[in-house]
Amino acid sequence: MALETHAVPQLELEAVIGFNGHVISGLRVHPDKEHLIYPLGCTVVLKRIEDGKPEFLHGHTNNVSCISVSKNGLYIASGQVNFMGFKAVIIIWDYAERTIYAQLLLHKAKVEALAFSPNNKYLVSLGGQDDGSIVVWNIETKEAICGSPASPHSAGHCLTVQYSNTNDNIFVSAGNGTLRMWELDLPNRKVRPTECQTGKLKRIVNCIEISENDQFIFCGTTSGDIMKINLKTGLLSDYGPVKPKKKGVSVLKMLKNGNLLVGSGSGTFTVCSTTNFKTLKKVQLEKGVTSIDIRGEGQQFFVGTEAAQMYRFSYQDFKAELISSSHSSAVNDVAISFGTSELFATCSGEDIRVWHIDKPKELLRITVPNMTCNSLDFMVDGHSIISAWNDDKIRVFAPESGQLLLTIDNAHRVGVTAIAGTRDCKRIISGGGEGQVRVWELQPSGHRLLETMKEHKATVNCIKIKSDDKECVTASSDGACIIWDIVRFVSLQMVIANTLFRTVCYHPEEYQIITSGTNRKVAYWDVYDGSAIRELEGSQSGAINGMHISQDGKHFVTGGDDKLVKVWDYMEGVVTHIGIAHGGSITSIKICSNNCTLISTSADGAIVRWRFPHPLSS
């Protein structure tokens, strides 16, 4: 990647939408009270609270699995997952410089949790279930001091770790049937565990919070209750509430006034007393709460959920203010409304969301439960969004209200995988997992199948229609792109390459098409005789999944598994700009019709808006 990005100007980033809400305690407030820190794919995002300006820490090779911030705010530590048999790295970042301070490599496959000691001398790390060890690191020397198996043989996996608030030598770990206090013996380079006695209570602990004076440990459990354990004696002092939280307690945070903030797997967020576990304040959020962090003295706090939503609360009125919402799984496609370019729509899992382009804000959410939307497009008149779904249906929605206007049942076998609408807004062309291309006529009272065209042998991945609505081109995983006559319904030309085609575009003058796919090449083809004109090396690693050409035909953009957005000069065949922000494979990319904005989406659920560097020459 260093070679590819060297000496090429970088794209200007305008906004980013995205947050991995599945990482427990992933959303953190930096001690400077001005930045939020959270994971997004392989990146760690620093976002200024005041104006939302993002910065990215790049260095992980796979998804970030945990984050911790030192008490003095000098360091951020983040761990990642990796493939079985490979080691997962922990990166300590220098916050002021936004650079890598140290890379620590010991744990196998996953880093489960991280915690800084109160005086920022040590970092304790916990490996995932394939590793099962606890390691204490010296931050100054960047080396491991000692390690130990996290849980006894008789117990299950360890899930979390937390440092004492006053003593650099004491930390606590907990998990399935295990709850241990550890003491670091620095001269002998050993950590010595003491089992906490919970009597007859058998619990799986999700999270630990230690009171400010280090008197008690509070443990949130999967059973939905909280255990209170004396840190000095290791004995169970109390537990509650009597009516446990649904789906378990997933995260705890101690307030300065001695009360606990409690987030549960069912989305309830409460303030509860530490003396009798009574609920003092309560609010219901969308999906399970996974992160709680306090800004300053506890007057304001931030909450993250599995639905990839972030909320801001003030302690006084305890009302949820939604500050950002995003997709919680891979974004499959993006479409920008034609002409105005004020709206764009994205699809991910069971959701279609419509956003305002200037201030990326969610305007509308359309949900079809338990289905997956593979592709979508705006009709040119802006009156409808057409979408392709994995339950073999085409659904047409109104973009203002989200109302379902039309459903075409059994449109394809093996799911509908690609879709496009004609300029006159009277026909839809769809492609399916079985390789068929179908043309549908939209009628005032319904729809009619005009023709089925069978030549592709595998999934149709992309459909583009010529501006006169008489021809279209389809790209398929069978290694063929076919140009069809959609008046007579016959194939006019076929181009074949040793690749799985992912994407195809017509040049605005429509005498050439450009294609790309898994062979990492961008190929130019002649529309009339199907001959190859030229081939460019599109990427040094990974497939190209998305491509779009500007309205004037002078530039095109690509994005793929190398996580880089590239802007190309069409005639020269060279990269003019590169965009570095994505923490996952880029799935789709579009330029708006007035050449101002570029939007890219990725497999980590992110949507990134860039300033397009080549405005239309008037």
Image: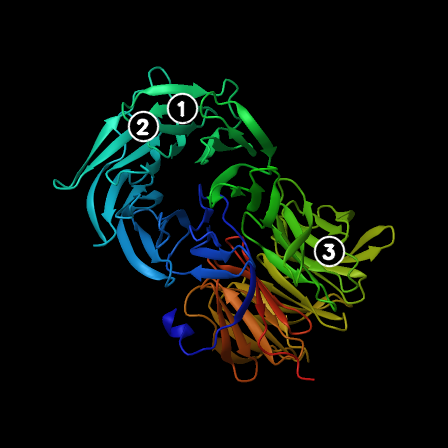
Q: Earlier in the sequence, mark 2 or mark 1?
A: 2
Dot in front, 2 or 3:
2
Residue at left offset 28%, top offset 29%: 180
Query: What is the spatial separation of the Cα atoms under label 3 and label 1, in whole angstroms?
Result: 51 Å
Query: What is the spatial separation of the Cα atoms under label 2 and label 1, in whole angstroms?
Result: 11 Å
Q: Is residue 150 visible?
A: yes
Residue where numbered disc 2 is placed: 179
Q: Does residue 97 appear to the left or right of 395 in the view shown?
A: left
The amino acid type found where label 1 is placed reads Met
SS for dot 2: strand
Q: Are marks 2 and 1 in contact (CB under 8 Å)?
A: yes
In terms of depth relative to the viewer, which is nearer, 526 or 370? Answer: 370
Residue where numbered disc 3 is placed: 385
The x and y percentages for residue 339 are: 74, 69
In terms of depth relative to the viewer, which is nearer, 82 or 203? Answer: 203
The amino acid type found where label 3 is placed reads Ile
In terms of depth relative to the viewer, which is nearer, 393 or 369? Answer: 369
